[in-house]
């Protein structure tokens, strides 16, 4: 409840609204006194009132309650094996356009991050989003492509004794 209360207050403040502003703009559907109580955690927030607040603030109800939007998925990080990328980029003279875009993108990230000695490159969510848009595929298709071309860095599982 404390996190929800803090999130309510944070959302309201980020929109430069006072408690009185919320009451006025909601046509008194959301009372300033009640909202203040929710934000302090003095009053329990019903599902119905949470839904009203998420509609008013134009945020997903799941974000209001959990801090995560429904489009945020918990996903494993994509780590690229740069040794394999370098070997493929040097050995193949005429590479496919998808691979050319991918390699250009990866080398651009390396240059931007000034990480010239690394053997592994972690792709951030924003990197993956941009790359999938550029290539024209889904996240799953990108992961499949990387796996098929052995470009993913695989950690070795410890063997059981």
Image: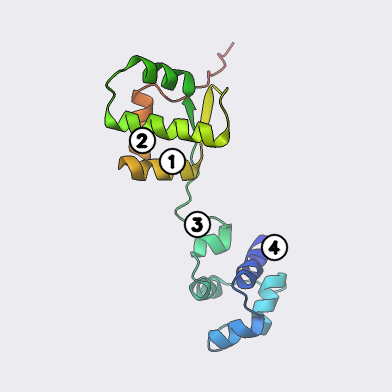
Q: Is residue 125 above or below residue 105?
A: below
Residue furthest to the top: 161
Q: Is residue 138 above or below residue 155?
A: below
Residue beneath disc 2: 142
The tag earlier along the polypeptide, 3 or 4, is 4
Image quarter of residue 18: bottom right
Whether the residues at callouts 4 and 2 have beta carbons within 8 Å, the answer is no
Whether the residues at callouts 1 and 4 have beta carbons within 8 Å, the answer is no
Q: Is residue 32 above or below residue 156?
A: below
Residue beneath disc 3: 69
Whether the residues at callouts 2 and 1 have beta carbons within 8 Å, the answer is yes
Q: For label 2, count other residues whose C-alpha is less than 10 Å away and answer few (under 14), some (14-19) or many (20+).
A: some
Residue depicted at 58% across the width and 88% down the height = 24
The residues tagged by marks 1 and 3 sit, at their Cα atoms, a distance apart of: 18 Å
The residues tagged by marks 4 and 2 sit, at their Cα atoms, a distance apart of: 39 Å
Q: Which mark is residue 81?
A: none
Residue beneath disc 1: 128
Which is more toward the observer, 13 or 44? 13
Which is more toward the observer, 56 or 135? 135
Q: Quadrant of the C terminus?
A: top right
Residue beneath disc 4: 2
Image quarter of residue 101: top left
Q: Position of residue 119 (x, y in %)?
A: 53, 21
The tag earlier along the polypeptide, 2 or 1, is 1
């Amino acid at each position: 409840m404390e996190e929800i209360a803090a999130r309510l207050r944070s959302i309201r403040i980020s929109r430069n609204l006072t408690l009185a502003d919320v009451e006025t703009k909601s046509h008194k559907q959301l009372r300033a006194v009640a909202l203040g109580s929710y934000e302090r955690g003095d009053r329990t927030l019903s599902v119905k009132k949470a839904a009203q607040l998420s509609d008013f603030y134009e945020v997903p109800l799941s974000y209001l309650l959990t801090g995560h939007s429904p489009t945020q998925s918990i996903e494993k990080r994509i780590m690229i094996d740069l040794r394999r990328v370098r070997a493929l980029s040097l050995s193949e003279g005429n590479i496919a356009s998808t691979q050319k875009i991918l390699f250009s993108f990866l080398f651009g990230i390396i240059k931007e991050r000034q990480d010239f000695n690394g053997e592994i490159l972690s792709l951030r969510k924003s990197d993956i989003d941009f790359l999938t848009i550029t290539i024209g595929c889904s996240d799953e298709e990108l992961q499949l492509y990387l796996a098929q071309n052995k470009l993913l860095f695989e950690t070795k599982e410890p063997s059981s004794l």
